[in-house]
Image: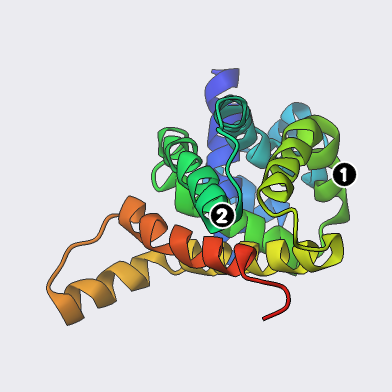
Amino acid sequence: MAKQTKRDILDAAEYLFSNQGFTQTSLREITARADVNLASVNYHFGSKKNLIQAVFKRYFDVLMPEVQQCLNQLPSLEGTRGVEHLLTSLIPPMLALNAVSENGTANFVKLLGRGYNETQGHLRRFIMQDYGQCIRALVSSIRLCLPGVPEEELFWRLHFAMGSFVFSMASSQALTEIAESDFNKHVEINEVISHLVPFVAHGLASDPKS
């Protein structure tokens, strides 16, 4: 019973956070959607910050081991080819998030976008403390693919790449509906990602002097 209550709270919080944002979502709204009382939230999570982190944790706990395994198996490739190969290898781990919840991949990226937009400092500290080793390994792998890109320039490129990814996933439903209307083609989220990867790879790997 307690385990189900905790999951109900997490599901309600995830839905509201992804659609309304962290700041705009109150604990009262979460308890109403989960059909629990405030004491249950305090018992299981202690605070709103802890609840936000718990929503991310159930995704990161699935994603990060898969990402690390991909990084361990990467060949040594440079330039656009290397980055595209790396990003393509991350598609299955990202799609595996659909097993966490319905539309889990898109929901997770929307939550990441909310975290960026609302400057949730505690969230960055939580992510880097619990999953920083894998994140640093990912950035290092990208850096190895792009030895000619200065570190500061790579920082901006990664920021813009994340923005493209967040926007595309957050609007994935609209994109699939437009594709179906304009091209009479039903597109799944994995196809959205497969179109995005080459675009991001070329952006990351372009010649800094050009």
Q: Residue at x 55, y 48 (%)?
A: 82
Three-letter amino acid code of the residue under disc 2? Val
User: Which quadrant, please, contains the N terminus?
Assistant: top right
Place of residue 40 in the rendered image (x, y in percent of width and height, measured from the top left): 69, 32
User: Residue 154's mark?
Assistant: none
CA gap, disc 2 and disc 1:
18 Å
Q: Secondary structure at mark 1?
A: helix
Place of residue 52 in the rendered image (x, y in percent of width and height, measured from the top left): 72, 45
Residue ranking furthest to the left: 184
User: Residue 109's mark?
Assistant: 2
Q: Indicate whether 168 appears above or below 10.
A: below
Q: Residue at x 19, y 72 (%)?
A: 180
Place of residue 67 in the rendered image (x, y in percent of width and height, measured from the top left): 59, 33
User: Residue 125's mark?
Assistant: 1
Decide which of 31, 141 is in the foreground and name it.
141
Three-letter amino acid code of the residue under disc 1? Arg
Task: Determine whether, in the image, residue 193 is placed left or right of residue 1.
Answer: left
Place of residue 120 in the rendered image (x, y in percent of width and height, measured from the top left): 82, 57
Judging from the image, the colouring scheme is rainbow
Q: How many marks?
A: 2
Decide which of 81, 39 is in the foreground and name it.
81
